[in-house]
Every structure is written in C-alpha cells, then in structure tokens.
Amino acid sequence: MKRHDRYYRAVWLILALAIPAGASASPEYIESERQAAGSVQNSADSLDHALRGKKLRRHFEALGRTLREGTLLLHPRNYYFHQRSDGQASREAWAQGGWLSYDTPWWKDRLRLGTTLYTSQKLYGPADKDGSGLLQPGQQSYTVLGQLYLEARLLDGMTLKLYRQALDLPYLNRNDVRMVPNTFEAALLMDTSHEHFAWGIGQVHRMKGRTSDRFVSMTEAAGIKGPDRGVSVAGFRYRLGNGLQLGAFEEYGRDYMNVFYAEANSRTRTLGDWGLQFSAQYTDQRALGDKLDGDFDTRSWGLKAAASHSGIIATVAHVRTAANARIRKPWGGSPSYLSLMISDFDRADENGWRLGLSTDFSGLDLKGASAFINYARGDTPEHGRNASPDQSELDFTVDYRFPGGPARGLWLRLRAAFLEQDGDEGNDDRQLRVIVNYDFPVF
C-alpha cells in the first residue's frame, strides 16, 4: 500500500468513527458555509439560501456619524488542501487569509455602504502541485477588493443594491469552498420584508472568480471568447403557512444560455421530535441568440426525502440529467441534491442517487459539534455518445464551533472525499480539506 493510500485510509477511519450512522443533503455550495443541522426544520436548501436580506436596525441622521458607527469584521481563514488523482499530479497548498469587511448602519434610514477586502497568502505550495484553488495559478498569493456596494432602501421593505456584492442564487453564487468566494458587479432590486413572500430582479454585469483578482464579463467567466455579455436575473420564494415553500429563478445570459430553476419543499413536524421533509427540483438550460458556447438544450430533475429525530437527519435523493447535454455551472455552485465535494453527478444522461446522514449531537449534549456523511452513485450509458465511467463518491465532514468563552467564533472543520470511477478509463480522486475559520468583530 502506498504512503498516500495509508494516509487517506487513516483519515477515513477517524471520520467514520466520529460520525454516527445517520444525512444532510444540501448542495455543496451551501454545506461549505454552514454546519449540519439536527432537524429538517433547521436544514437549509437553495430557496432558503437565496433572497436573504440583511436586517439592520440602527440608523443615523448625520452622515459623519453613520460612517463612524459602522461594523468592522475580521474573518481569518486557514486552509490546507490536498488532492490526489489517478494519472495526474497531486494538488496541494496551505494558505492563510480571509477577509476584512466594513458595513455602515443606515443613513437617514435610506442609504448604507459596505466593502470587503479578501486575501489568500501562501504558506506552502509546491510548484509541481498547483491547482488547489486556494491560490492563483503558479501558487501565487493574491488580494482583491471583492465587495464595494451602495444599498438604498426604497418603498416599504424594497432595497436596491449596486456594484460589487455577494449573490447566493442557484447556479449564480459565492460557492465559498476555498479561500475566497465568487463576487459580482450587479444591480439587484429585492424585497425580503414580507414573512411569506420574497422576490428579486437584477442585472449582473461582471464577476470575479474564486482565484481571480479582477472582474470579467459573465461570458468571459464562462470561458467564452467573444462579445462580453451580462446576465439578467429574476426570482421569487413563497412560503405557505403549512410548511410548504415554492420558488423559481430565471437567469438570462444573452447570446449564451438561459437557466430556469424551480424548487418545492415541504417540512412537516410529526409527533414528538420527529420531522419530515419532501423536496423536488427542476433545471432547464438552453443556448440563446448567437449561441456563443454552441447549441445545447438539457434538463435535470430531482427528488429528496429526509427524516429527523433526536438531532439526526437521514436523507435520500435522486437526480436525473437529460441525455442532450451536461449541466453547465460557470457562475457558481450547483443547487442539485447530488452536488458533493468533488462531483455534481450531472453529466449527460447520468442517473444518480444520494444517501446521507447528519447530526448536531444534540442528543449527546455536545454543543458546537456537528458532522455529516454523504454517499452518491451516478450511472451513465455503457455505449454511445454519452458513455462514460460510472462513478461513486463518499464524503465526510466533522465540525466544531466554540460556543462561548475566549474562543467564541472559532470554527474548526475537517473534510474528506473519495471519488471512484469504474473501468479502465475511470479516474479516482482523494481529497482532504482542513479549515479553520474565525469571526472576530473588531468594533
């Protein structure tokens, strides 16, 4: 057995012993930002993640005091990443960085400013192990002003947010799975003030990828050489009183593609501590106008069921992708129920299943601790234009967030992923992530 094989098997054993047999099935771009929940009532999905308003109550009449009374937050992040793939060079890096953000309260209850500076500085990064996503190509450190926005409060609870900002929409989001998230230059009109209904419309002009220090057009961000194009977005979320939630989003990339996404979730609390959740999702992607990335037309649809009891959630999900083409996601993470750490299981004509368990250890009264494990399997045709190796992935995550004391705000995270593809043409991947986050309010 090779040294790296022993290393990964040891990590697998530690994580397997730490996690009870139990599932979280949020998409990877959401799981990367939060700990596992212990109940379906507290679990997150793409609709919960989108159209979130920031509730600020303080406001001042004097502009000078408004600028002085802001909130300065330092968020250090330490990240080690290692990936070993068959037939390819290993990817490895260790970085220190994070972000420094400053947000003002409302001025005259109408305007506020916000800005965030991001950085990722190399601690370790061999030149022959590039490509971890923690650093720029060539294992280079970088710093970027990722957010700089003006937000205006209009009629009732309606707000208009302008210029550089974070977005969390399906297929168009931060996807904060490395050191620095995606951010966007956009104008977004949104209303999240109502208890049951939220909506938003906007225009996204440019984006900054995770390892980039500059903003480029949405078509360039998709790897397209040619005219620079933006993306028009619109969406809503509606919550009914019986635990049912519906939502849909449209993302129109002129001369490139249109993305339509819809999701429905139903959460039910049964007798005692039991909870049930049933969900469905649908994606439609198709080429538009000049078809700068070629002619394509594809869809995917998925179902998910989850049950929770005594701090443990068990989940099963199924997603099927149409045979026409793969699902494209150049602007962020996928909302698919089968989006895991390495693969999203959305190749053309792929039929996938996912099983998962998560716990917040509330049954053991371990405050701050949580864990989840996910297993997915994806099958594609054996012959024809969509033939590709069948694949399976097993992911583990263990978290501990200090609940109080001097270390309050410190979040420790250990993650491991194992992807295996069948056949002689298949490639196996092994991935390890060790992450330390810390929220430190300066003032």
Image: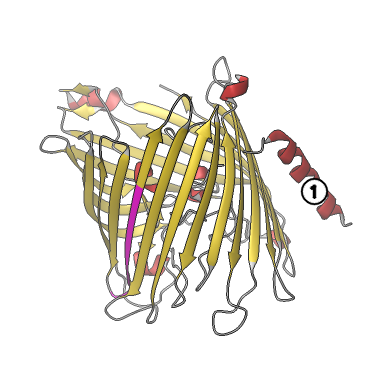
Q: Is residue 113 above or below residue 229?
A: above
Rendering quarter of residue 427: bottom right
443 relative to 13 in the view: left or right: left
Q: Is residue 368 above or below residue 43?
A: above
181 relative to 53 in the view: left or right: right
Residue with the most extreme top position: 405
173 relative to 193 in the view: left or right: right
Residue drawn at x 60%, y 19% as measured from the top left: 365
Residue with the most extreme right position: 1
State the extent of the magenta-drawn residues as a range.
255-264
Q: Position of residue 366 (x, y in %)?
A: 61, 21
Question: Which of the image's four quarters has the N terminus?
Answer: bottom right
Compare residues 246 and 36 and report the one nearer the observer: 246
Residue 295 makes an appearance in the image: yes
Q: Position of residue 132 (x, y in %)?
A: 62, 56
Instruction: Give the residue pinned by disc 1.
Output: 9
Residue type beneath disc 1:
Arg
Residue drawn at x 24%, y 41% as measured from the top left: 150
